[in-house]
Amino acid sequence: MQEKVAAHKSLRFKFVLASIVVEITMLGLLLGNSLRLMNATLEEQTQAKLQALSPLLDGALSGRLFERDHAAVMEILGKLMSGGHANFAYLAVYDQRGRLYASLGEVDPARMPALDTDVTASLKDLVYDTASPLMLASERIGEVRYGLSLQSLVAARDTLLTQGAVIAAAEVLLSLLLLGLAASLLTRHLRELSLATRRVADGQYDLPIDTRGNDEIGVLARSFKAMTEAIRERISALHQSEQALQAEKERAVVTLYSIGDGVITTDTHGLVQTINPVAEGLTGWHDAAARGRPITDVYRVRDEETGLDLENAVLQAIAERTVITRTGRAILCDAQGQERAIEETAAPILDRSGQLIGAVLVFRDVSEMRELHRRLAYQATHDALTGLINRFEFERRLAQLLEAGTWRDSHAMFYLDLDDFKVVNDTCGHYAGDEMLRELARLIRSKVRETDVVGRLGGDEFGVLLSNIQMDAARQLASSLRDAIQSYHFVWDNRSFDVGVSIGVVPVLPGTGDSASVLSAADVACYVAKDRGRNQIHVHELGDFEHARRRGEMQWSTQVVAALRENRFVLYHQRIVPICAQDAAGHHEILIRMLDKDGTVIGPGKFLGAAERYRHMVELDLYVLSRVLAYMEDPTAEGLQRLSVNLSGQSLGSTEFLDRVKEMLRRSRVDLTRLCFEVTETAAVSNWNRALGFMRELHAMGCKFALDDFGSGLSSFAYLKTLPVDYLKIDGAFVRNMGLDRNDRAIVAAVQNLAQMFGLKTVAEYVESPELVSQLREIGVDYGQGYAFHSPEPLPHLLAEIARESPQPALAGSGLAAG
Amino acid sequence: MRVLLLITLWLWSALTLAAQELVLGIFPYVTPEQLVKFHSPLRQLIADTLGRPVSLVTAPDFKSFVQRTQEGQYDIILTAPHMGRLAETRDGYRRIASTGHEVQGIFLVSRDAPYQRLGDLNGKTIMMAQRISLLYQMSEQALRKEGLRPGQNVQIIETRTHNNAMYAPLRDEADAAMTGIVLWEAAGEAYRDKMREIGRTESRPGFMLMARRDLPQAAVERLRAALLGFDKTPAGRAYFEETKFKSFREITDKMMREMDPYVTVLLE
């Protein structure tokens, strides 16, 4: 719309008006000053005339007055009155005494007008009334008073003023015309520019703008043109930027809608702004319904354990201006009341200046993961066979009891070792032995108090933790338990077996020792009881350790030291065979055996416990590693893809061991990527910091790492993100029974998924049948190890085989000997 | 009672007289400017002596002065001696004093003029004051003695005052001038260097100071006494130095009688 400027508000009008006002003011001042000057001149002229007249009158009249020559005086007065120079209105001559001597003109001698002091006072009657003394020889001989007519002077002044006013008016009129013309010419370009600005405002940027002229308007026109072009360019850039922003927004929306996690954004008050499809599915709220609603309506979470509502992560993130992450116990309740385990992260959204503008919530359904975790956690603390807690958990609860109690509390522990269990295993097989163990576990559980803790501590070993019990009562309870087991008959394939039990009883007194010492004391007491014959109960005494050392593990400890000294350890190997993995080269786990002095091969189960208990594992691991490196340096071993060496927890925790291993590896010519270390997750976790350092350093040198017995001692997956692990070896306990137990199969599958998630390869242990191989292939397990593929055999055989055969490994069935 | 009345009348009369202005008329022998300049001390003396204000006046010419004297317009007059004689004899004025100088005419020509004596003025023009003046009459006598007859072989140009007549040769208004010797002596050196004397008239007594007859005799006496001693005062000496009158002296009958021949012209 074209805006018209009112004529009286136009620049031209203001310019002309201002100029005219200034001019009129100046002319007024000029006229005023002229009037003042003319009045002053009138005064000066009048005074000058008076001064000129005074001596003339004096000269003309004083002598005649002195002579009292009235006729002459009158004649002089007449001439003065008729003369055209002075314009006398009247003349009156007075003698020395002030008496009127003669007068002429329009005056009443009796009422002579007062004398005027200046011209202004005489302007009323236009006659300047004044007097002049008549002097002779400095003697005043009379006075002449006369009226000087100012009419001609005033008329001249008025004429001048009138002429000045007319000239001023003409000048104003002329100025008005010229200024109007000049203003019109000057503002013509401004009008054009004004029109151009309106067109620019309407979006028309291609305007013919006259930029000629070197005056300020010309400069303004050029500046305006430059500005118009700059605006056009910037608007163009803005459009491009807008399109890019729109495309970016569309990509962001597509991304948001494609993302696998639920995403909700809110404003600073926690009101929902966007909600992606996954979030819709998880919360049960549709986008349209959720928008604008408080986040607490759409997204409600509670604590998995307590059932109480959790503080909303979005509101917390807004309030604290920090990222809130919950991975553990959050349960999302959707609009239909369905609950899901979730992991959630809420973060404040800040703009470039750091101002809070909203929040974003990202969450995912981790129900399956949490269930797996829960089951793995259960498996980590329970014995899969009997359902009792395992040794690890038993030790934890024992430690808990020791730490929580006071010296006044009295607790006790039973260490049970079944007598003649091996008979059942050997005659009826593992399944029979397992079944008998399950039944005995139920029996033991039924014979102790509800509050007592029963755990499976080893193959045929059980532990009972009795809280708040005196030793006499404990002894009685142990006796009744022994009697119950003694009375128990196990029937398998119509055959009946009797079993006995040796029970070691030890008091548990808070503050008197750690769990290891208590467990050790109970173990020794049990050993003493067993040493005394079947179905014996022995309450711990101070001499038990000496007895045990003399008769038990101490012997094995001594044998380990001797065997190391006498080089009586031999290395075995067992193949690790690809199931779903594509590589075919040989991968073997190194196993250890001891040779008795008579040449009998002794399995690791006999001496590893003693070696571990009496801290010979570092020495033993170094011995194995040096032997393996020596083997691998043999040119015939080049066909071996990789050898895995087991490391104990003691070695992992030893700084000296790390230094010595690094020294050995540096001296070795072996390609270290062919060397793999197997560590149990329990060992790694229990020596976390040192184990992490150990693994990182060796991994950096090229060595591989496998996490052994994965699933058996697991409490969290978090460490998988941190540990430099390449393989997960699935605990054989799950693999062996997965054909029969769906839970075990689910766990194996979950571990496989987990490994995939972390980019790790899996190795299934205890693969004892072709059926298991098929199932493992279905699940996607990468490698297998067990009797189904290969039975352990001495390492020299491997080298001979490699030298003899092609690199293609052969499948052979056998069980894993020991790790 | 009558004494008291007389005292009252005397006092009233004296107060009235004291307040009444006296008019001192001086015959116009020089310009009014010079008259005032010369005789203001005399006016002041009279005023101081008589205790009455004195107004100094003159007349346009000798004739008017004589006429106004006759009309009694002047209380006191300082006049030419023959006019004084007429005032006494015809108008009743009383003698007070006469000036100490002698009235004598002097003939003057330009210093470079070719005239050496009065006889050289034959056929020439002489400017002198009014015909009724004493000096005019004494000049005619002097000229006649030299064979010059005014209106015949010498032309008399009459002017209003002796002062005006004195500088006529310098203005080329006349070949010679006749004026009073007193005026010549009082003229400035500038004029005296430009002119020279070629003849003189006889001398006669000076000007006469006379009082109208209504002026009380006591006042006349008091005034005479003051005048006769005036030359002994600083003001008097300055006055006489200015006017060249020398002093005031008694008017004798001889003085009066000598003036009778010159009175006739005043009565024409």
Image (spheres, coloured by chain):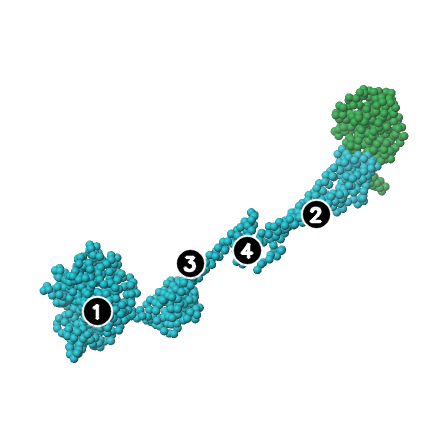
Rounded to the nearest angstrom, the CA distance separating label 2 from label 4 is 45 Å
Any mark on residue A166, and which?
2
Q: Quadrant of the C terminus of chain A?
A: bottom left
Of the image marks 2 and 1, the number of the one nearer the N terminus: 2
Relative to A610, residue B230 above or below: above
Any mark on residue A767, and which?
1
Q: Locate residue A405 relative to residue A24 in the image: left or right.
A: left
In the picture, one chain is green; tell me its letter: B
Q: Chain of mark 4?
A: A
Do marks 2 and 4 share a chain?
A: yes
Relative to B128, residue A713 above or below: below
Q: Which residue is mark 3?
A: A352
In the picture, one chain is cyan; tell me its letter: A
Mark 2 against mark 1, which lies toward the viewer? 1
Of the image marks 4 and 3, the number of the one nearer the N terminus: 4
Q: Residue furthest bottom?
A: A494
- Quadrant in which residue A78 is drawn: top right
Identified at 58% across, 52% down, the residue is A189
Which amino acid type is marked by label 3? Arg
Q: Which residue is mark 4?
A: A197
Identified at 43% across, 70% down, the residue is A288
Q: Secondary structure at mark 3?
A: loop
Which amino acid type is marked by label 2? Val
Relative to B91, residue A289 above or below: below
